[in-house]
Amino acid sequence: MNRVAIVQITSSTDKIENLSRAVELVREAGSRKAGLVLFPEFLMAFSPADQSAEELAQIAEPLDGPFTVSLQETAKATQIAILATLYESSSVPNRVYDTALWIDATGTIAAVYRKLHLYDAFGFRESDKFAAGSDVTPPLTLEDGRFGMMICYDLRFPEMARILTLLGANVLLAPSGWVQGDLKVEHWQTMIRARALENGCYVVAPDQVGNIYIGHSTIIDPLGRTVLDIPDREGMEIVDIDYGLIRETRARLPLIQNRRSDVYRKYIPSM
């Protein structure tokens, strides 16, 4: 088993304050023998609606900026892997990437994922501030885990979860800032459970709470059972991932092997 720490926080608009809290939480997760600590989307800072794209771009940093370097130093010092998120500077004027970083226990950036699906829905337009990523990131290995990275709105696109699974993922990580609204908690819970069930994997989804977000950081197992649901409060919980359950579920419910890709591929050009 892997012990993972899932963090639910309310990020402020002050990235220095948020970084300080993140460092403290990583140290706490290390003291509790977790091998991986997972933060939600927008760890670096909350971006209020009245913040301009230019102002957000000024907050953003490159991958070798002080925000990331501090987390790398903390990972190395505590010997714990970190999934963190930041606003990454881009070459597109007044646009930033919504980026997830896997920092391994040596402090090395092992993988970078830039959010593919921007949340232009329900009255929001992330594309007014963000640049979209251009590819999925292959899963990362930690002990028996093969971790595939997604971000928030990506959960609504089953193709992405399936691609990561076909690339070998048995745990899907979805750091999120799921916005409040009518039926939004139900949507959140349904999407996470569906992605777990259809791929025979765990889905681990740390979420922001407070500001405009729902909380309910969640872990669902391969059979669709709720392992963890943190309600509307800040906190960190430690959970064991049972890789034996993944293998057993996939043996009993061989969804990947039962696919009819010979039929599906006829329709792929029209998707």
Image: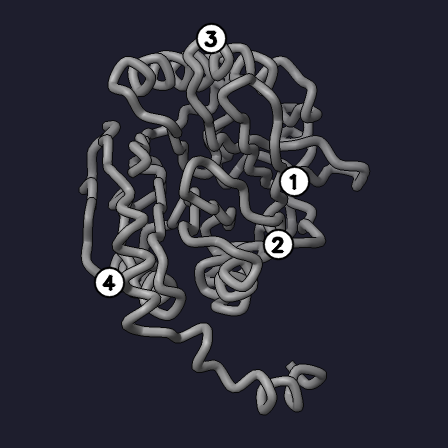
Residue at (71, 53) in percent of width and height: 134
What is the quadrant of the C terminus in the image?
Answer: bottom right
Does the rendering let one see residue 8?
no
Q: Which residue is mark 3?
A: 77
Viewer-nearest of discs 4 and 1: 4
> From what the image shows, is residue 213 above or below residue 193?
above
Q: Are marks 4 and 3 in contact (CB under 8 Å)?
A: no
SS for dot 3: helix
Viewer-nearest of discs 3 and 1: 3
Q: Given the image, on which type of amino acid does mark 2 rest?
A: Leu
How far apart are labels 4 and 1 at the CA level? 31 Å
Give the image location of residue 101, x and y in percent.
56, 33
What is the quadrant of the N terminus in the image?
Answer: top left
SS for dot 4: loop
Q: Given the image, on which type of amino acid does mark 1 rest?
A: Tyr
Residue 97 numbered tag: 1
Q: Given the image, on which type of amino acid does mark 4 rest?
A: Gly
Viewer-nearest of discs 3 and 2: 3
SS for dot 2: loop
How crowded pointer 3 is (Cα within 10 Å; few <14, some 14-19, many 20+) is rated as some
